[in-house]
Amino acid sequence: MILSKLAGRPVLLAAGLLAALALPWFIYPPVALDIACWALFAAAVDLLLGFTGLLSFGHAAFWGGSAYATGLIALHSGLPFPVAIIGGAVFAALLAVPIGFLSVRLTGIYFAMVTLAFAQMVYFIANQWRDATGGENGLQGIPRELFGLDLSEPFYFYYAGLPFVLAGMFAAWRIVRSPFGRVLVSIRDNPNRARALGYPVDRYRLLAFVLSAGLSGLAGGVFAIGHGFASLEGVYWTTSGQAVMMVVLGGIGTLWGGAIGAALVVQLQDYLATAGFQETGIVTGLIFIVIVLLFRRGIWGTARHLRAVRRGRRQRATIRRARPA
Amino acid sequence: MLQQAFNGLVGGAFYALLALGLAVIFGMLGVVNLAHGAFYMLGAFGAFIALDSLGLNFWLALVVVPLALGAAGIVLERAFIRRLTPLDPLYNFLFTFGLALILQDLVKRQYGVNSQPYPRPSQLGGTVNLGLFTYPAYQVFVLGASVLVCGGVWVVLTRTRVGMIVRAATEKPELSRALGIDVGRWVTPVFGFGIALAGFAGVLAAPMRAVNPLMGSDLIITVFAVVVIGGLGSVFGSVAAGFAVGLVSALGNYYVPSLSQTLVFILMAAVLLWRPAGLFGREEAL
């Protein structure tokens, strides 16, 4: 069943996999790892925004929260880093239960505000709880070795982290294509009708929120191990905004579009930073505004739209030809 | 203890002014302005620039800077916000997020991340004897100015014809239109007014707090929590919650310092559990 669905789009899938595998050969490896992590983060946010219709502006709490949890596990337990990463993802999902429980009672812009506020609460806790999180210095020196294998070289760590990202992407794709995912889409399109059909809408939203948080946590954990540190920046609200921005740039509701958005934004910021331009907000904010004003479908969304338009035109032409004059 | 409470009210004055601006903009346009904190920051920098390069003192800045920012707000609404309002509200949210990033980093690029000094106006340099304790005169002035402005807005909204129109257009835009009120005409000035309020708060903050590019982005989220507590779209609720949150966090800071900054969010969670629409919000607004 899964395999037959996978086989439906073998070319795109193979191209995506190949691109993911080849990335660190063409791009500075740490940047490649950032792209992979942010791509999964964006997919997780899109799971909620594009398929459930909830704009979370607080996902930094799960990405950054997991970064801290992953880092603490790796630093203090001596467990290998894959365990730490999974522990971080579980922590993020658990954190999402109370936050989601309170947030999903609201929708739309209210939901965005409330998730944002809760994430800021996590930020303040991370800032104040210095003994555990290191406060403004963050957590440093998170180990990157696996059974004696030294992975501190970013090029090699990329291939150690990639399986997590791919597994997360696959999970997101499975969730969206599952019966559960179809219910989410129906809730997005018409919550009242879904409710009338007997679906417990809030419970579905909560579950989607928790799953999305867990995947964000997975991405944040890989990011923390990959860089060897977890910092306050990861839980700050602009991080949530950046993830949403990648989704919008790639195309809301496209799942894979976020990866393109992530690649462009991370590359651009790396370029600006190496050029000595520190105030990246000017450029990224400008791009964001242009997309919101003029290019709301995003890159992947536009491509898909154009293809659909062309296909529709071709079909209409076929029908016209078939019809006797 | 009493002094702590007073500190809280002064802090609450800023929350109230910002929450009031957010609430009128939200009520009228359905826009949650993420750039509100950036305009507060611009207000403070406006005061600094006015003094530093134009030689305008604090009192002039208190008038000129909010007017200038209000005008900028009007242009912004006309040029961009207006085009996005018919769409999903999330686009305006995202637009103002992008704007906040740009404004903050533009100021950062010009002035760096270090705080800029701003002197207290000489007339308000000393302390005032409030009977039970003495208090810096400037803080008393901030509190008074905020109460006066919030009260003034309240009177305008409830007692005047303009206020009646704005309230009607906020609550039932379709019906107001049917009754011959040109709702669109009122949207722009209300937006400008909300931005001017944020600028006003920023000028007030300049002599008291650090004038810093990041001062707005830290504050705005707390103000969001304030607005959620007070009730989305409720002007009265926003102002009342602003002062109340100021009070609670100052007292919390006194008794449990480690919780000081998270207290407001705990408060928000409690209110959401009890009343998802906020203390003064209407359920139907959700």
Image: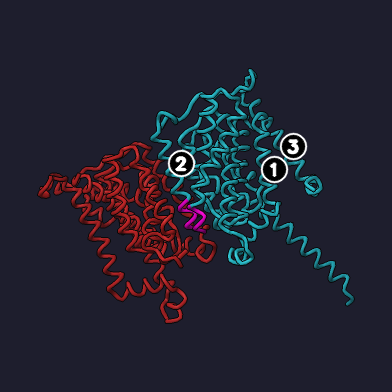
Q: Which residues are magenta?
A: A102-114
Identified by mark 1, the residue type is Phe
Tell me the chain of label 2.
A
Q: Identify the chain drawn in red.
A: B
Where is residue A62 shown, x and y percent of the image? 52, 41
Residue A104 part of the magenta-drawn span: yes
Instruction: Name the residue tied to disc 1.
Output: A170
Where is residue A252 shown, x and y percent of the image? 61, 53
Residue at disc 1, secondary structure: helix
Residue at 18%, 51% (x, y): give it. B140
Where is residue A115 shown, x and y percent of the image? 48, 50
Quadrant location of residue A148?
A: top right
Q: Is residue B71 visible?
A: no
Q: Identify the chain drawn in cyan.
A: A
Spatial separation of the CA atoms under disc 2 and disc 1: 27 Å
Identified by mark 2, the residue type is Tyr
Residue at disc 3, secondary structure: helix
Residue at 40%, 30% (x, y): give it. A130
Q: Nearer the viewer, mark 1 or mark 3?
A: 1
Instruction: Name the residue tied to disc 3.
Output: A18
Please tell me which residue lies in front, B195 or A75. A75
* Numbered mark located on residue A236 in the image: 2
